[in-house]
Amino acid sequence: MTTAAAANPRRYLPFIVATIFIDAIGFGFIMPVLPQLLMRVGKMDLSGAISVGATMGLAMAIATFFASPILGNLSDRFGRRPVLLIALGGLSFDYLLMALANTLPLVFIGRIVSGIFGGSYGPAQAAIADITPPDQRARNFGFVGAAFGVGFVMGPAIGGLLAVWGDRAPFYAASALAALNFAYGLFVFPETLAQGQRRAFDWRRANPLGALQTVRAAPGMARIAVVLLLWQIASLVYPLVWSFYGIAAFGWSPAMIGASLAAVGVTIAVSQALLTGRIVKRFGERKAAMIGLAGAVGGFVAYGFATRTWMAFAAMVFILLQSCVQPSLMALLTRRATPQTQGETQGISAMAMGLGSIAAPLLLTHTMARFTGPGAIAQFPGAPFLVSAIFGLAALAVLAATPRVATGRASVVPGDGIEPPTP
């Protein structure tokens, strides 16, 4: 942690949390109107818009995958503040571009640019690692998760209301929100990374293959990155198939789908803000992540076999435990990085999650289609949740098998259950 940051960390955290919140809410703004925009601009029907939207989502995930290690390394070289400000300014311009786009290629380019600047999630979390002692990182990462959860819930709801003024209005609103956060950061947010803890930018490390070399160099980091990848695939079942699942399994209306998503988001936000820190303090980050993964698997299985609406809402109790996973894993990852490589490490985590974002639609959405379509072997809307349960179990197994001894390190990694090497 830098000396300046240690003096007054409260100057830093609100901006970082606001950045993640605005990123989530801005993305949510455009969700309700993107299909209509694609149909109008591309002059296509709904099925065509769904196909194009899926392709855009894949391109966006790929852009994030490649941009994340670059932005992470840039933040290690120039500091977190300039990278975050550039990303916020870029997002503001990007949303404005999409608001004015009158051709399908422009909309497509806009989504790719969103993916590039969406890689700022890594530098934002690196800034948290800069300003927070190791034993408090899971709690602060929990605040970030809560901000994302609240933004994810509020975004689509507000976007739907803004759509009354046309399918361009949410894009203008998202652009204005990103611009306001840019101004907030420009005048309020100080730098979190001291000059003496910066390192030279190296293209050999600022790419996915170079990032993998860094992963292998730090004891235990590779396994934590694999757990993040598996968890990302499992957890994306909610945003990817929940709406379809509600219709297919329970015959939900759009209003009920919105209410259920709000309930999920509020549960995540409350849990990460109020519960995660207590569980981590009681059990440590490693065990907290394992408890969360076990709870998540229970929830996936419950949703897989739920047959009534009340069962779906009752199963949300598992989400209370699930909310421990991401912050705990991020805290475990930051412990394995030096102050000079926090940005790079967070870029690696974003890259792992980007890979998961690429794989998840192919695994989960395809499974949903196979088990709900007219030619399905059996009508089983809960099938993708069982796929997520398998990936959740795999993540739990990898984390459990991660050695407790930090091989080759002279110091102990506290809070991780890691013990000093045996002489």
Image (tube, helix red, strand yellow):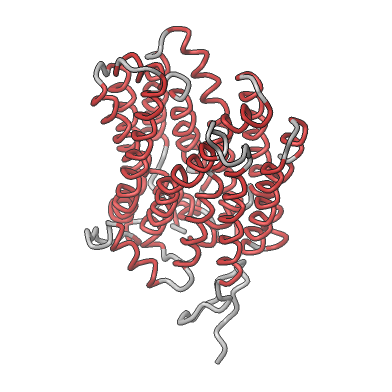
Residue 331: percent from the left, percent from the top?
Answer: 54, 58
Quarter-wise, where is residue 86 in the image? top left
Task: Report the quarter where the C terminus lies.
Answer: bottom right
Quarter-wise, where is residue 283 in the image? bottom right
Residue 382 visible in the displayed image: yes
Residue 415: percent from the left, percent from the top?
Answer: 62, 66
Q: Tell me what residue is drawn at x 46 percent, y 49 percent.
A: 125
Q: Along the line of sight, which residue is nearer the eye, 225 or 17? A: 225
Q: Along the line of sight, which residue is nearer the eye, 221 or 49? A: 49
Residue 2: percent from the left, percent from the top?
Answer: 44, 57
Residue 275 visible in the displayed image: no
Q: Tell me what residue is drawn at x 38 percent, y 32 percent.
A: 187
- In the displayed structure, 41 sits above or below 362; it is above
Horizontally, residue 134 falls left or right of residue 59, namely right
The outermost residue toward the top is: 165
Horizontally, residue 127 falls left or right of residue 64, namely right
Q: Tell me what residue is drawn at x 43 percent, y 23 percent.
A: 30
Q: Along the line of sight, which residue is nearer the eye, 154 or 251? A: 251
Residue 146: percent from the left, percent from the top?
Answer: 59, 39
- In the displayed structure, 137 sits above or below 306; it is below
Q: Tell me what residue is drawn at x 76 percent, y 36 percent.
A: 311
Horizontally, residue 242 falls left or right of residue 109, namely right
- In the displayed structure, 252 sits above or below 383; it is above
Quarter-wise, where is residue 405 in the image? bottom right
- In the displayed structure, 117 sits above or below 177; it is below
The tally of labels here is: 0
Horizontally, residue 129 falls left or right of residue 281, namely left
The outermost residue toward the bottom is: 423
